[in-house]
Amino acid sequence: MPKIGFIGVGHMGGPMARNLIKVGHSLKVYDLSEVAVNLMVQSGAERAASTQDAAKGVEYVITMLPGGGDVREVFLNDGVVGAADQGTLFIDSSTIDVESAVTVHEAASAAGFEMLDAPVSGGTVGADNATLTFMCGGAKVAFDRAQIVLEGMGKSIFHCGERGQGQVVKICNNMVAGIIALATSEAFVMGEKLGVDRRVLYDIMSTSSANSWVLNNACPLPSGVPGVVANNGFKPGFMAKLMLKDLRLSQAAAQLAGSATPLGAAAAAAYQQHINNGHGDLDNSSICKLIDPEIE
């Protein structure tokens, strides 16, 4: 099994890396958090002294970082590209802006490396259970080579096109998810204020034209449906502040494309207000608290 350098082993990267160890890969890990690195070492990973060290002597380098600036810093300024052995495949699973993704791709290509932008969907539950969806942008040969690694972390793996196209698909997907979460919250609150029980609303909407993945897996009102995060005090899951990040990325992408996204803009504004109200660390389904602050 190939050896992998993994940079960024926090809430998402940590369980992803542990799943790679479970299927037999050797990992060398780096994170700014010593606690995160220590947990990985306890799981069988080797500690890297720096980002450059994580990129040395491995066949793959995977990054899971907070934003585009962090990805550019690691690849362009920290010297990961210069430190890696020739033939190393770079896989960036961060969710970042399209321009940053393309910039890093170009830098890797100029140095003779293949790279994939491979953001994920599925949240921490998918990361824990190795059921993530990977949306990959880059050369088909790089995508094919990455399969042995991605299959250890995910269930659905897609080649979306050339460099940056994985980020485009991820941004589009999460813009829709944010819009649906907001619309579903509005409908549930309105229905309940007019006297209909939450579970009745769910039972009917889930078998009608209002049905969606969000409704069934992240129903935004407690007791609307069993087993969703709203029933656990909106413990994430996928934090509201991360949904806002993705919605902002969607608006930057819309500006880049010259494409109108009025609903995406409305969802971004709503999540911004929700975060301003102090709910950024709750699950994104807590957006219902913006519609009705009394919801617990």
Image (cartoon, helix red, strand yellow):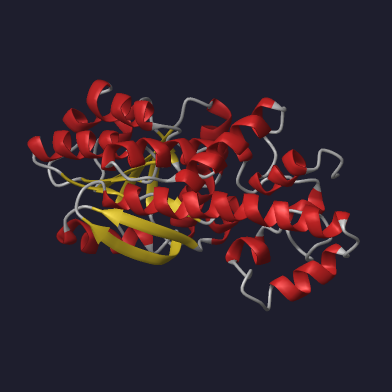
Left or right for 14, reference 116: right
Q: Quadrant of residue 66?
A: top left
Q: Is residue 221 above or below residue 270?
A: below
Q: Quadrant of residue 105?
A: top left
Q: Is residue 150 above or below residue 62?
A: below
Q: Residue at x 54, y 54 (%)?
A: 177
In percent of width and height, residue 108 lies at 16, 37
Q: Residue at x 79, y 54 (%)?
A: 190
In percent of width and height, residue 205 lies at 71, 71
Q: Is residue 220 visible?
A: yes
Q: Residue at x 21, y 48 (%)?
A: 163
Q: Residue furthest top?
A: 77
Near-viewer residue (75 or 276)? 276
Near-viewer residue (92 or 59)? 92
Left or right for 179, reference 156: right
Q: Is residue 168 above or below residue 279?
A: below
Instruction: Quarter of the image for the C terminus: give it.
Output: top right
Near-viewer residue (54 or 77)? 77
Q: Is residue 280 visible?
A: no
In percent of width and height, residue 47 lies at 43, 34
In percent of width and height, residue 146 lies at 27, 58
Q: Residue furthest bottom?
A: 207
Q: How many marks?
A: 0
Instruction: Quarter of the image for the N terminus: give it.
Output: bottom left
